[in-house]
């Protein structure tokens, strides 16, 4: 089916129209400094907000850098930029977009790699987050485009290796389509939120996403190894840690996704089998492959280092953390806290339902758990509001929930 130009959006169509190519065709990829200056000038001459998306190579590369930038603005059309070919030197583009509102879908996924390129918005509109606040159950770009604009996006290359060069034409079609409808989608969601009285809530959320600091590094990232829950011996955990760290260093140095260097399943299998010789290690699945045989010395050295650790240097099975325990244990460990959590969850579920919001967007579940596990000594509405604000809740969330939470905490304690 041919593309219908996105300017002709008709939300009253009974059947969504499939978009198979962007209006105006696929532009040539900007790969040279002169072309970048021309593209930046064209974007600066456009009007209204600019739609932005990035393509990374997650699953293929260690880094989360952007391998392609897609931009679209009224009066300009779509622009595709290769930041790798330009060595990340995007000064003209940064200047052109300095005072323009950016539209992104699931912005928290794209902002880190854009920031790495020196690109940071002064004003943000996140269409995925807007969809959540507007009460839509499905908030993927495709779902919202179909629901609100009656267009169906042809997908299929999101998980591709975008570090590949040259990029296949069908991939560029997919990439261009990712920004084809974002401007119209922003307009539809803006109107919807305004009608629901949630527009101010949305802009508070967008600003929180825009200004969020980078997440703190995990203290023990190796504990996220898939399948590690099957290991209940500290020595086995030490093997996982040693192999994970060796793999991470190799992956970082070669810029290869860790799972492509050595899968998690192989790490866990080695910890379970605990081979005592290189021959035993190579006999295990995955380690018997050609690539792993070349690295067997590194894997076996890591394995031996874990096997020889003194007992006091072994990792804990259940390390302490700075948060409350899993809620499944609350009833036994602190029945009063369990009662508080149940009461607060009930009132938050009611508020969320009344406002057509996902409860996790009303207040972060971790914030709720921490508040209920260790509430302030004085649980009046003002003190609860103060605690919520200190822990990152936005003003609209505080206004909507503080009094109800205070009442629930008081009632649960009686």
Image (cartoon, rainbow, N blue to C red):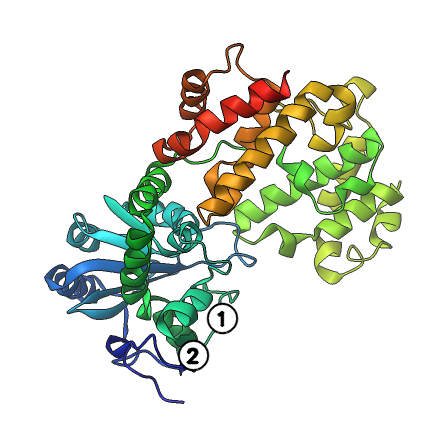
Which image quarter: residue 316? top right
Q: Is residue 263 above or below residue 390?
A: below
- Do we see residue 187 in this rendering? yes
Label ID, residue 157: 1
- Residue sitting at the far left: 45
Relative to the observer, which residue lies in front, 378 or 319? 378
Q: Circle 1 — which element? A: loop
Q: Is residue 287 above or below residue 179?
A: above
- Residue sitting at the far top: 377
Indicate the quadrant containing the N terminus: top left, top right, bottom left or bottom right.
Answer: bottom left
What residue appears at the point 79 percent right and 25 percent down from the top-left corner?
A: 309
Q: Is residue 66 above or below residue 414?
A: below
In x, y percent, where is residue 412?
63, 21
What residue appears at the point 61 percent right and 43 percent down from the top-left corner?
A: 248
Sequence-earlier tag: 1 or 2: 1
Q: Circle 2 — which element? A: helix
The image shows a total of numbered marks equal to 2
200 relative to 106 in the view: left or right? left
- Do we see residue 219 in this rendering? no
Relative to the observer, which residue lies in front, 118 or 107? 107
In x, y percent, where is residue 399?
38, 30
Label ID, residue 170: 2
Q: Residues within 10 Å of mark 1 (few under 14, many from 20)?
A: some
Q: Are marks 1 and 2 in contact (CB under 8 Å)?
A: yes
Indicate the quadrant containing the C terminus: top left, top right, bottom left or bottom right.
Answer: top right
Label ID, residue 11: none
Relative to the observer, which residue lies in front, 96 or 46? 46
In x, y percent, where is residue 343?
61, 29
Q: Residues within 10 Å of mark 2 (few under 14, many from 20)?
A: some
What residue appears at the point 45 percent right and 77 percent down from the top-left corner?
A: 154
């Amino acid at each position: 089916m041919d593309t219908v130009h996105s300017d002709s959006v008709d939300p009253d169509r009974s059947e969504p129209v499939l978009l198979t190519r962007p209006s105006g065709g696929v532009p040539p990829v900007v790969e040279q400094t002169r072309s970048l200056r021309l593209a930046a000038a064209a974007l600066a001459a456009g009007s209204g907000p600019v739609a932005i998306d990035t393509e990374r190579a997650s699953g293929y590369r260690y880094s989360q850098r952007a391998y392609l930038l897609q931009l679209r603005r009224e009066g300009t059309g779509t622009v595709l930029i290769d930041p790798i070919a330009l060595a990340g030197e995007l000064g003209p583009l940064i200047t052109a977009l300095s005072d323009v509102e950016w539209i992104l879908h699931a912005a928290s996924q794209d902002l880190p790699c854009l920031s790495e390129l020196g690109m940071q918005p002064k004003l943000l509109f996140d269409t995925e987050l807007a969809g959540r606040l507007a009460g839509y159950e499905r908030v993927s770009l495709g779902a919202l485009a179909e629901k609100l604009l009656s267009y169906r996006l042809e997908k299929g290359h999101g998980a591709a290796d975008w570090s590949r060069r040259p990029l296949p034409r069908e991939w560029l079609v997919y990439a261009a389509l990712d920004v084809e409808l974002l401007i119209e989608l922003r307009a539809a969601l803006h109107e919807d939120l305004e009608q629901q009285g949630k527009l101010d809530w949305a802009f508070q959320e967008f600003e929180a996403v825009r200004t969020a600091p980078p997440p703190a590094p995990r203290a023990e990232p190796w504990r996220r190894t898939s399948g590690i829950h099957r290991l209940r011996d500290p020595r086995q955990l030490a093997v996982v840690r040693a192999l994970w760290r060796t793999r991470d260093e190799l992956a970082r140095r070669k810029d290869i996704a860790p799972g492509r260097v050595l899968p998690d399943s192989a790490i866990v299998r080695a910890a379970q089998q605990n081979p005592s010789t290189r021959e035993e290690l190579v006999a295990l699945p995955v380690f018997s492959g050609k690539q792993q045989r070349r690295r067997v010395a590194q894997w076996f050295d890591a394995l031996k280092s874990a096997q020889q650790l003194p007992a006091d240097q072994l990792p804990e099975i259940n390390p302490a953390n700075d948060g409350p325990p899993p809620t499944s244990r609350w009833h036994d460990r602190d029945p009063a806290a369990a009662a508080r959590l149940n009461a607060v969850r009930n009132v938050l579920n009611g508020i969320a339902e009344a406002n057509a919001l996902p409860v996790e967007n009303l207040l972060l579940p971790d914030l709720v758990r921490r508040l209920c596990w260790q509430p302030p000594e004085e649980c009046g509405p003002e003190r609860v509001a103060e605690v919520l604000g200190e822990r990152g809740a936005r003003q609209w969330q505080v206004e909507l929930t503080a009094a109800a939470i205070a009442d629930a905490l008081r009632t649960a304690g009686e």
